[in-house]
Image (cartoon, rainbow, N blue to C red):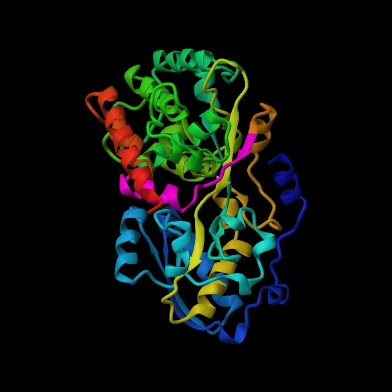
Amino acid sequence: MKRLVAFAAGLLVASSLTAARADGIDPSQVQGKITFYTHWSSYLTDGLFDRWVAEFKKLYPKVEDVDVQAIATYEDTIATRLSTGDYGDVLDTPRSVAKDDLPDFFLPLDDLRLTNDFHFSDAWAVGGKPYAFTYGVSVEGMAYNKAAFAKAGIKDVPKTHTELIADMHKLKDAGIIPLILNMGAGWPLETTDGLAVDISGDPNFRDDMLKDPAPFSADKPYGKSFAIVHQWITDGLTEPDLTTNNWEDSKGWIASGKGAMWFLGSWSINQIIDEGGKKAGIANYDPNNIGYFPLPYDDSGKYNVTSGPDYGLSVSKNSKNPETAKAWLDFLLTKSDLPQIAGFIPGYKKMPPTLIQMSEFQGYNPNILERNPGGTAYTNATNLINFSGGKGAQSVMLASDYDAAIAKLNASWADAASRAGQ
């Protein structure tokens, strides 16, 4: 991972139209209108997509319009659209689509000649052809407000789980919400999936758990991951309202110091700084006030941290304007600054990362695992029990009887895993 960052940082963005011709795009065919479905709702309301569309149309003057449809409930909404066949021209690759099923919904992108230029390009490859490329690579950790830590008398970030819990109680005693869980939104609990991989130390944990009929038991990596979150809740170390979707407001809570931390991917850091600063009413927010450290999930003083691709970007198999759709995909991923604004190590290897917090994060010497996102059988199993997108963790954490909810989830998983490969 460190080599990945250093390699990406040392390269320049290929931004000229002349350089783009190596990507297989014929500018004379890039014209007309396309529709783009995305989960980046905040970038639409902030006007960023207006800028990117304008830049795209300047690059390709024959383009009439890119209709950007940003959906806050992206996974649920796009799943319905997939079933109807109406899902636009370009879209963030839905996580509910099993890898082997990608050709049923999307066009191959091998003609863009980008496979060797992207990290995790094999994550959406079927039969040697890519059906998506990722916006960027993210690692998961604790984003924190340094001023909030100082107010609570915390001088150093915690290196063990015992220290973490003690510091969280110090924050609570200082009148600060120790950790914003955002359970009402649901999807932020996806980090429990990555945490289970961290605890296991196995990059292929997702596929391997198909062999385990009870992966959520207390002594298993998933059980330990869930237990950590459950302790935060039962100890009163999170925001008190766990049922309302406070995602947008929570950015301001962290920026202002009302809340101290959240456990999310590195992509979330810039959202605290840029959007959170505005919500908190703080002009020229200092990005150095936000730090980032690996979550210490035990007392060993050592930790694994998973890295993996964020959303991919695909072109609809039903697109009536595939050339323009592919050009828009190429533009967003290789020529716009979206991946950098999102706080990613850009998926495009020739684009340098700009997130300053990664230097601090790497200073704690975590062992970086390149997580396997899971194959078709894993996706099928999670779809059968409505587990992905944080929904599995959410159902357990909101249950009145935690142990009973774990037992029920194990039973559901055993049945789903047995049917997933059929």
Task: Determine the residue positioned at 69% across, 61% down.
Answer: 116
User: Could you say which is closer to the camera, residue 309 or residue 235?
Assistant: 309
Residue 264 shows in this picture: yes
Task: Determine the residue positioned at 57% across, 65% down.
Answer: 127
Q: Is residue 408 left or right of residue 75?
A: left
User: Could you say which is closer to the camera, residue 330 or residue 241?
Assistant: 330
Q: Is residue 87 left or right of residue 152?
A: left
Residue 306 placement: quadrant: top right
Task: Determine the residue positioned at 38% across, 49% down.
Answer: 420
Residue situated furthest left in the rendering: 400
Please say if 248 is above or below 96: above
Is the N terminus in the top left, top right, bottom left or bottom right quadrant? top right
- The magenta-colored residue range is 368-387
Please say if 66 is above or below 336: below
Q: Position of residue 95 (x, y in %)?
A: 43, 53
Q: Position of residue 156 (x, y in %)?
A: 60, 18
User: Could you say which is closer to the camera, residue 53 or residue 126?
Assistant: 126
Residue 302 placement: quadrant: top right
Residue situated furthest bottom in the rendering: 28
